[in-house]
Every structure is written in C-alpha cells, then in structure tokens.
Image: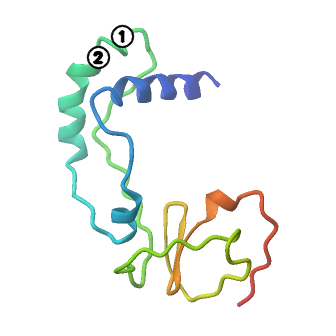
Amino acid sequence: MDSLLKSGQIEVALKTFVNDKTNWRKMLKNEVNKVDLVATKNQLLPEASNMMADLDAIELNNEVVKIHYPVVEYPSKIVSLNFDNTPDISGVLQGIKGQYLLLDTGVLNIRKFSSYNITLEY
C-alpha cells in the first residue's frame, strides 16, 4: 500500500505540470505524438522535485518500457459501442489498445462494462 500511495503522490505532483488526460479518440485512431520520455523526465524532475521531496523511495532510471498493442487496422472514424444501447455487439477484432477493443464495427471500452455478464462467441 505504501508504494501505491507514493505512486499517487507522484502522479498528483506531476499532473501540476503535465496534462494527465489522454485524448482517447486520437489514441484509438493512432494519431499520437511521439514523446521522448527520458527528456520529459529530465525536464519535469527539477520542476516537481520540491513537491516530491518527502518521498524517499523514488528510484530514477532511464529505462523506457515499450508496450506494443497488436492492431491489424485502426478505425478512421470512432464509433463507440455500448451494451446499454445495443445488447448484441458483433464484429471482427482488429486490435486492443489499452482498455479498448477495436472491432471492425466500432470500439468498445471494456472497462466501462466490467460488472456486466457477457457471452463471447467466435
């Protein structure tokens, strides 16, 4: 719990300087800007260091973790699918991006429906 608390405190300190909201529509269309994470860290650290001074368990490194989401095809137009409006959703899975399933018929925010009981057929 201690490291989770510290992670939250670091997030609060950093969001003072960086927008922490992802434009999910652009992300799902793969319209993303490449960011040099090490350079960004080096820029933010002096700005946020006084806000994180009490956190003694911060370990800094320059290792960047690259997460690859396999996507066959990104949608050109985002159509949100919703079990509340359409109980039967069908389509061919084109890929996964974060919490979203990319289907050829639209995108499904699977986290939004985490408490739903669904049946998956293929």
The amino acid type of the residue labelled 1 equals: Ala
For the point 47% across and 22% down, the residue is 9
State left or right for residue 35 relative to residue 85. left
Give the secondary structure at mark 2.
loop
Q: Are marks 2 and 1 in contact (CB under 8 Å)?
A: yes
Q: Does residue 14 sit above or below 22 in this rendering?
A: above
The amino acid type of the residue labelled 2 equals: Ser
Q: Which residue corresponds to mark 2?
A: 49
The foreground one among 81 and 64 is 81
State left or right for residue 29 relative to residue 55. left
- Residue 76 is drawn in which quadrant? bottom left
Label total for image: 2
- Residue 13 is drawn in which quadrant? top left
* Residues at marks 2 and 1, CA–CA distance in whole angstroms: 6 Å
Q: Which residue corresponds to mark 1?
A: 53
State left or right for residue 14 relative to residue 42. right
